[in-house]
Amino acid sequence: MSSWTPDLTTKLGPLELKNPVITASGTFGYGLEYASLMDLNRLGGIVVKGLSLKPMAGNPPPRIVETACGMLNAIGLANVGVETFLSEKLPELRKTDTKVIANIYGHHIDEYGELAGALKGVEGVHALEVNVSCPNVECGGMAFGIDPAVAASVTERVVRNADKPVIVKLSPNVTDIRIVAKAVEGAGADIISLINTLTGMAVDVETRTPKLANIFGGLSGPAIKPVALRMVYQVSQAVKIPVIGMGGIMDYRDALEFLIVGARAVQIGTANFVKPGSSLDIVEGLAGFCADHGIRHIGDMVGSLKSPAECRR
């Protein structure tokens, strides 16, 4: 039994966390929904449900479908709007000792800037996460994150209006995610998070209809982990700013894989639906692994991937 406790503190540029485990946007509500099920103070961070300028009802049901090794969702970014979040949700979140990250999205570049401005100077919001996987109505509905130049423009607008660290959450639905990552880094992003969901669909063979009312949805869960790992590794090699990895993390060993390929922190998403306490299990698992392997600081795991040649020596 070790006489020391592993240090899980994590630094993401200007953002410091007590540990590298963050709950992902859209999978943890506004955090308060889980308060009766777990101790929110033990998390490294909470990313709240994506916020828009005005309340959004989202897509019509059905909008969640279970798939092999995962799930599809087409919630449509339903949320209470930034004003209600500030007046009703944030006061309760301020009572926790956990960093709160506001995920924001818009359908125009100007909306992203307005949201960043609305959160400027707000106590209790420690960083912004910019969702560039939303449809850009100015470009025919193409997601902002598909075009590196547009993603950079969104990032610049948010950075210009923000007084908090800016995280840009990348879409995996691109040819080369490294190009987009470099573009948002050049535009002033402090941190990059990836991956958002992969676009997919499911069909009911009896009725020959899509299982989602929206037809298409975002695929998440263990099915996407190999893709997510590859992209996190590529982006970690391509940029100098910190990377947060996500995509199919269900336990602490999954989380370790993302740290090993270069992520400095991880976000837990679909696992929250399977077991509400998954994030805390992962925090404990990381501490136990470090203690068992003589690793004094979790940062020593980051980017520690060995080449096949090194393993043969």
Image (cartoon, rainbow, N blue to C red):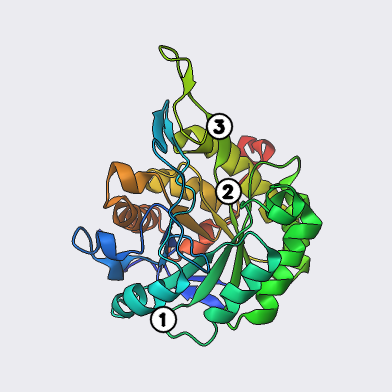
Of marks 1 and 2, the one in the foreground: 1
> Which residue is disc 2 drawn over?
195
The amino acid marked with disc number 1 is Gly
Residue highlighted by disc 1: 124
Residue 270 found in image quarter: top left
The x, y position of residue 189, in whole percent, is: 68, 69
Tell which residue pokes out farthest to the right in this image.
149
Q: Check disc 3 and give the amino acid type.
A: Gly
Q: Which percent across, then down, holds residue 163? A: 59, 83
Question: What residue lies at 33% left-to-right and 64% top-to-bottom?
Answer: 31
Q: Nearer the viewer, mark 3 or mark 1?
A: 3
- Lower position in the chain sequence, tag 3 or tag 1: 1
Whichever of callouts 1 and 2 sits on the residue coming sooner in the sequence is 1
Return the residue nearer the eye: 232 or 260. Answer: 232
From the viewer's perspective, tell me whether residue 279 is left or right of residue 180. left
- Residue at position x 62%, y 49% in the image: 232
Disc 2, SS: loop
Q: Residues within 10 Å of mark 1 (few under 14, many from 20)?
A: many
Q: Quick check: 142 above or below 33?
A: above
Q: CA distance from mark 2 to mark 3?
A: 15 Å
- The crowd level at tag 2 (other Cα within 10 Å; few <14, some 14-19, many 20+) is many
Residue 227, can we see it?
Answer: yes
User: SS class of the residue under badge 3?
Assistant: strand
Q: CA distance from mark 1 to mark 2?
A: 26 Å
Disc marking residue 200: 3
**On screen, residue 239 above or below 64:** below
Q: Is residue 1 left or right of residue 292?
A: left
